[in-house]
Amino acid sequence: MLLVYICLGASAQSGTNSPYSQYGLGVLSDQSQGFNRGMSGLGYGLRTSNQVNVLNPASYSSIDSLTMIFDMGLSLQLTHFEENGIKKNARNANFEYAVATFRVFPKVGLSVGILPYTNIGYNYSTTEALPSSSTTVTQNCEGSGGLHQAYAGIGWNMFAGLSLGANFSYLWGDYDKSVTVSSNDSYVNTLGRRYKASISSYKIDLGMQYEQKIGRRDALVLGATVGLGHKLGADPSISISNTNPQTAVMQVKTDTVSNGLEIPLTIGGGLSYKHGTKWLLGVDYSLQKWGELSYPEVDDATQKYQLKKGLLRDRHKLTFGGQYVPRAYDTRHFLNRIHYRFGASYATPYYNIGNVKGPKELTVSAGFGIPIFNDWTSHSMSNVTFLNISGQWVHTSAKDLITENTFRINVGITFNEQWFKKWKVK
């Protein structure tokens, strides 16, 4: 209960400084956990008994019947911004997630946890001088907020090889974005726009995995997921203000769009190949149908706040990753027991900036998992606590817009204990 309270408090903090978070619902969060962060978020086709894989709820059925797994993680990042020769750095830290899973029935696993969905956090300004004049105009943009989700998921191994699963999430959060245009001329009015919304809704994700054994040690796993798109029941609003600096009189006009926000249909698929405990390779692809959604915006002709098509676009993401373990049960050489991970991903933007496509995103990652065996005599990977550490380099760029280079350190720990083991007295 204490850890859940800490997570709820930490989720109120923004995990980004990016000006791109002002568009759409914000910067989409990486919903992977510590072990697959080192593989750039690979997960649809991953099936393991000693880690929590929220990306595909069908994987919960692989959890060992004796264990209780709890996983929590945080990240620290440094971002370098560059535009037209201007360079800035920003640092932040964020508590990322807390998830747990355990077996409730034979062939049925349950998982619960808290994850981020989007992040909004930016504060920047631009100043321009009017031609042939000493007057300058300053535009200040500021925003905060984001969406979070608390979920409960279940995975069922229907029969040999085939598992189905579902995550049922409570989605909540808000955003507050503002744009203020002012001048050093005391006779020029100050104009402002403030966008606000409060969201409280649900989210449903369905998953499937099929595992095909190949010989004694090898296995091929095919995974697929579907996230249902729907309206969020939120009423986004805008307040347009006009302030006279001479009289300090402010005129405010407020407009609201009823049920104006929604999340898209999401389809994902992945394939992984594993050779015993020695190595694993996998590839994932996901499609988010943002392009079919409308988003509230002020119409230039009527100045009315209304839903508009063409502000968002479909998002594609391709991920490749893998893991190598020299000798998982080598009791003499520590480096042979470490899980070495690597990965890369490429994602297209889900929004437009004016008439220009938003920034594409390239991620390269590497990391390792340090196993802490609780029982060396059992030689079982089902009773191992892991310290997962990974580094990610994320390059975000679009033509004639801000370029971001982010270096992120992810630290997670997976507690794996045999809570449900029955003791025998001889």
Image (cartoon, rainbow, N blue to C red):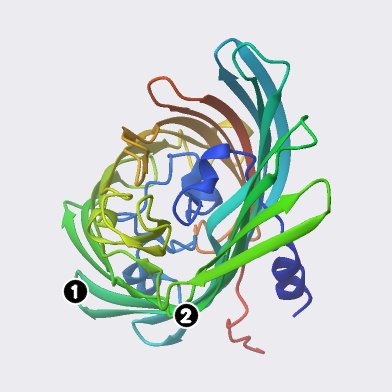
Q: CA distance from mark 2 to mark 1?
A: 36 Å
Left of 153 or right of it: where is 332? Answer: right
Q: Which mark is residue 181?
A: none
Quadrant into which the N terminus falls:
bottom right
Q: Position of residue 62 (x, y in %)?
A: 37, 69
On the question of residue 270 being in view, the answer is yes
Left of 414 or right of it: where is 35? Answer: left
Residue depicted at x 67% and y 15%: 133
Q: Which mark is residue 160?
A: 1
Lower sequence index among marks 2 and 1: 1
Q: Position of residue 107 (x, y in %)?
A: 33, 82
- Around disc 1, counting alpha carbons within 10 Å, would you say few (fewer than 14), some (14 to 19), or many (20 or more)? few
Could you say which is closer to the camera, residue 84 or residue 184? 184
Residue depicted at x 65% and y 16%: 87
Q: Position of residue 20 (x, y in %)?
A: 51, 40
- Judge depth for marks 2 and 1 and give the one in front: 2
Q: Is residue 287 above or below residue 307?
A: above
Q: Which residue position is annotated with label 2? A: 201
